[in-house]
Amino acid sequence: MSDTPSHSTAVAVLTAAGSGTRLGGRGPKALVEICGESLLHRATRGLLAAGVIDHISITAPATAVERFTAEVADLADPGRIGVVAGSPASRQASVARGLAAALRARPDAEIVLVHDAARALTPPDLVRRIVAAVRSGHDAVVPGLPVVDTVKEVAVEEAIERVVGTPDRERLRAVQTPQGFSRATLEAAHRFGAGSADDEARSARDDAALVEAMGGQVAVVAGDPLALKVTTPLDLALAEILARGEREQS
Ligand SMILES: Nc1ccn([C@@H]2O[C@H](COP(=O)(O)OP(=O)(O)OP(=O)(O)O)[C@@H](O)[C@H]2O)c(=O)n1
Ligand SMILES: C[C@](O)(CO)[C@H](O)COP(=O)(O)O
């Protein structure tokens, strides 16, 4: 636990450099639209709407930095949002680049959120909950939801998957973003894990895993089903329905 003052500057790294292979992979996934708005625009708008983020650093595919900059230009002054080239190697490597850019833009930052553009429908209230939890003294905070399926651990033996265990579902959480950190903790975690960032297979699945690996504590707060990650065509169809429902209500 650390003491992060209530007026402390908070920045966000918004990861958007992925290619969307599982979605079908025609161009950057962050530019795919739900209800006529790109995932990137929607996710950036959600972070800003929370009213607690001072600067957003977006990771884009290296060939799309200008395109991504134009995509979010209507949302805030140029100084409030920066776009940098992420890494094709792994999400972890992209976050490291986004983090460096965010801290160059706001050297006074004391809180850093890491968020997936693919979780475009994330309610602003969840963003506020994460920042509040870091402000209250937690060095690393993730949103989590109970797991509804029974999860099996498997091992591959002679090309056949065999079950080797059934973890107690009550003790499992499906973890989302935004994940929030004290600046010192996230910087230390990325330094600790830097050796595996360029190897997708060995890289960390999320930023909290880097904190865990260096022996840090990670707190879980209630997640939100609307923070679902658009990964497959089914997720995209669901996100479209949810966004349409929201538009009809407003
Ligand atoms: N090298 C990478 C890989 C992923 N991401 C970002 O990390 C988030 C989570 O990744 P995921 O949803 O898996 O996106 P993709 O990597 O695009 O999907 P896929 O694995 O299907 O290609 C996304 O917002 C994605 O843009 C990133 O910035 N850099
Ligand atoms: C960070 C994350 O969204 C937490 O659930 C997830 O680990 C990203 O995984 P992906 O395979 O890179 O989409």
Image (cartoon, rainbow, N blue to C red):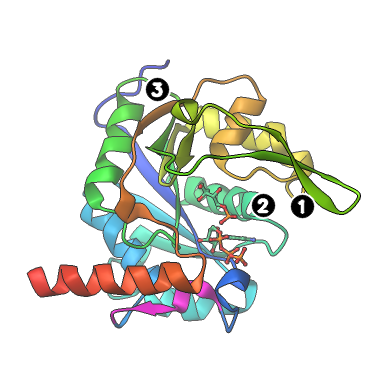
Instruction: Tell me if the residue at label 2 has its CB under 8 Å from ligand 1.
Output: yes
- Asked if residue 91 is positioned above or below residue 242 in the image, the reply reads above
Q: Which residue is mark 1?
A: 198
Residue drawn 31% across the image and 74% down it: 240
Q: Position of residue 193 (x, y in %)?
A: 71, 36
Q: Secondary structure at mark 2?
A: helix
Q: Within the magenta stretch, is there residue 81?
A: no
Residue drawn 36% across the image and 62% down it: 120
In this rendered view, identify the residue nearer to me: 67 or 141: 141
Quadrant of ligand 1 in image: bottom right
Badge 2, how many Cα within 10 Å: few under 14, some, many 20+? many
Instruction: Say whether marks 1 and 2 touch (CB < 8 Å).
Output: yes
Residue type of the residue flagged with mark 2:
Ala
Instruction: Say whether marks 3 and 2 touch (CB < 8 Å).
Output: no
In this rendered view, identify the residue nearer to me: 148 or 45: 148
Residue drawn 87% across the image and 54% down it: 159
Q: Earlier in the sequence, mark 3 or mark 1?
A: 3
Q: Which residue is mark 3?
A: 138
Q: From the image, which quarter does the N terminus lie in?
A: top left
Q: Position of residue 59 (x, y in %)?
A: 53, 62
Residue type of the residue flagged with mark 3:
His
For the magenta stretch, what is the residue range?
A: 28-35
Label of residue 93 in the image: 2
Residue type of the residue flagged with mark 1:
Asp
- Asked if residue 14 is positioned above or below residue 230 in the image, the reply reads above
Q: Within the magenta stretch, is there residue 33?
A: yes
